[in-house]
Image: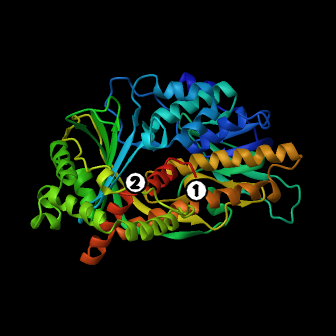
């Protein structure tokens, strides 16, 4: 039977009714869009329907182990959630399961270069927060109920149709199928705007005939939960030949979320075939550079000697390296080239390498999983009466933890475009009303997608000249405070 919450939320819509906005997909991007539309002064009177394949979200118990499905929210994403309602962030954090991280360290697992960032360099308290997806969804669901969003759970849009440009004034149409205690109820709804937020295999996008451009990486990401020997507030990431492994603090800081990119066969072994103890040991070895995960450089140098070698090299050739590095990095991340570096910034004062905490199993009631990796972008983000957001619009490599953050950025940009259209007296589903959203989303997301794809390819190379050059480049970036701060600012969603 439907829960009492689901019953209160269930739609009573009948065929032929009209809604201003129908959002297909109840993930974080879709739910945030629904809340933000109802919160924005210019759009608060719009009738918003959200079609969600899932039933009502259950709130995690306070003492339960952290779920493996987590996200590193940027400060920019936090502000988007704040715009969804003043109670959203408070509800997410009230049971102490969210962990802020104030520093980050990434290093080359084949060479010896590293780069470290700290929130304090930017005058911020945190670089981001690690949050379980279920906490965000549950908080947004409660806010939707408060705001009067018409949420249709256990439902799908089996058919959608957006009008052609020649059909001026025509509304979009959707056939909604709802599972009610094992029986299917269908109804048709017309909308001034349909938003596809239904994931990377978006049925709405396909129905609209919008193609995507992209490729697979031949990799899978393994996610899991482990414990550490001490509480920490650092996001750690080591680049291995098969892909990066990340350790992100969550909860009280003694738990950590693991995101490990590797080959499909190795992902199956790590996610399904090894015990919790064996998985924790593999994570520990991969982060510490032990056993099978020992760097080739360590055959001739101990770990500290390797790191000092690169730091000394930067000291000796500091100025020319900085000049080349800052221009290359600035172009790669799509931000303006920094004209000059601070003269007193050198490797001697750069953040030193730190080793991550020791890892142990989180417990027998934790789960692991894996998912395939690819990148793609829809060739069009809008059509008359239709807009794409989140994974329906674009998918990125997870090494920067930016996927969900980009989806929240889309929700913010689309609300801005709809609000502007209302202020100008435009039809919210018209091509002219939606064009600013498409332009802003491409400008915000494509540089990040290109940067993440470039990093994935750069750190997949194993030849000695490439590994040497990239480690030296990392060390040079680490020694250049202006470049280091610019990258950190960009990763925090500041662009």
Q: Which residue is mark 2?
A: 344
| Real-space CA distance between mark 2 and mark 1, rounded to the nearest whole angstrom | 46 Å
Q: Which residue is mark 1?
A: 392
Identify the image quadrant of residue 8: top right
Q: What x and y, as percent, mark residue 424? A: 88, 47
Furthest-front residue in view? 343
* Left or right of residue 490, residue 170 in this image: right
**Residue at disc 1, secondary structure:** helix
Position of residue 395 relative to residue 180, above or below, is below
Please tell me which residue lies in front, 275 or 283: 283
* Left or right of residue 66, residue 365 in this image: left
Q: In this rendering, does residue 53 appear at all?
A: no
Q: Are marks 2 and 1 in contact (CB under 8 Å)?
A: no
Please tell me which residue lies in front, 464 or 444: 464
Residue mark closest to the camera, 2 vs 1: 2
Q: What x and y, as percent, mark residue 444? A: 61, 57
Q: What x and y, as percent, mark residue 352? A: 27, 50
Point 63% across, 27% down: residue? 145
Please tell me which residue lies in front, 172 or 136: 136
Dot 2, how many residues are within 10 Å of its Cα: few (below 14), some (14-19), or many (20+)? few
């Amino acid at each position: 039977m439907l829960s009492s919450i689901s019953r209160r939320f269930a739609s009573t819509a009948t065929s032929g009714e009209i809604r201003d906005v129908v959002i297909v997909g109840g993930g974080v991007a879709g739910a945030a869009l629904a809340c933000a539309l109802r919160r924005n002064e210019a759009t608060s009177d719009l009738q918003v329907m959200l079609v969600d394949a899932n039933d009502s979200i259950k709130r995690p118990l306070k003492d339960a182990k952290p779920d493996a499905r987590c996200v590193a929210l940027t400060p920019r994403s936090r502000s988007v959630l704040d715009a969804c309602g003043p109670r959203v962030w408070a509800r997410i954090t009230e049971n102490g399961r969210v962990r802020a991280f104030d520093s980050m360290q990434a290093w080359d697992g084949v060479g010896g270069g590293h780069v470290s960032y700290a929130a304090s360099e930017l005058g911020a308290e945190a670089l981001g927060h690690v949050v379980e997806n279920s906490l965000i969804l549950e908080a947004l669901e409660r806010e939707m109920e408060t705001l009067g969003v018409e949420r249709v759970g256990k439902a799908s849009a089996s058919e959608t149709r957006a009008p052609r440009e020649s059909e001026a004034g025509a509304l979009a149409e959707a056939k909604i199928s709802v599972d009610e205690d094992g029986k299917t109820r269908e109804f048709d709804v017309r909308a001034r705007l349909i938003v596809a937020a239904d994931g990377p295999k978006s049925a709405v996008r396909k129905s609209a005939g919008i193609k995507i451009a992209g490729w697979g990486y031949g990799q899978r990401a393994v996610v899991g939960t482990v414990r550490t020997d001490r509480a920490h507030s650092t996001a750690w990431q080591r680049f291995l030949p098969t892909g990066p492994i990340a350790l992100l603090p969550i909860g009280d800081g003694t738990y950590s979320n693991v995101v490990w990119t590797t080959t499909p066969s190795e992902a199956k072994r790590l996610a399904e075939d090894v015990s919790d103890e064996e998985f924790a040991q593999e994570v520990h070895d991969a982060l510490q550079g032990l056993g099978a995960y020992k760097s080739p450089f360590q055959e001739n140098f101990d770990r500290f000697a390797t790191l000092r070698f690169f730091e000394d090299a930067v000291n000796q050739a500091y100025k020319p390296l900085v000049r080349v590095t800052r221009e290359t990095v600035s172009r790669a991340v799509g931000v303006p080239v920094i004209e000059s570096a601070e003269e007193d910034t050198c490797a001697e004062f750069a953040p030193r390498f730190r080793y991550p905490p020791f890892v142990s199993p989180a417990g027998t009631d934790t789960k692991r999983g894996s998912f395939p990796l690819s990148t793609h972008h829809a060739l069009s983000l809008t059509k008359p009466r239709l807009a794409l957001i989140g994974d329906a619009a674009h998918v990125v490599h997870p090494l920067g933890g930016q996927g969900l953050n980009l989806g929240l950025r889309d929700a913010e940009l689309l609300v801005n475009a709809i609000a502007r259209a209302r202020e100008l007296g435009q039809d919210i589903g018209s091509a002219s009303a939606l064009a600013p959203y498409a332009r802003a989303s491409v400008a915000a997301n494509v540089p990040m997608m290109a940067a993440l794809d470039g990093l994935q390819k750069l750190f997949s190379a194993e030849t000695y000249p490439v590994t040497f050059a990239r480690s030296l480049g990392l060390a040079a970036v680490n020694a250049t405070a202006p470049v280091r701060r610019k990258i950190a600012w960009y990763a925090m969603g500041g662009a």
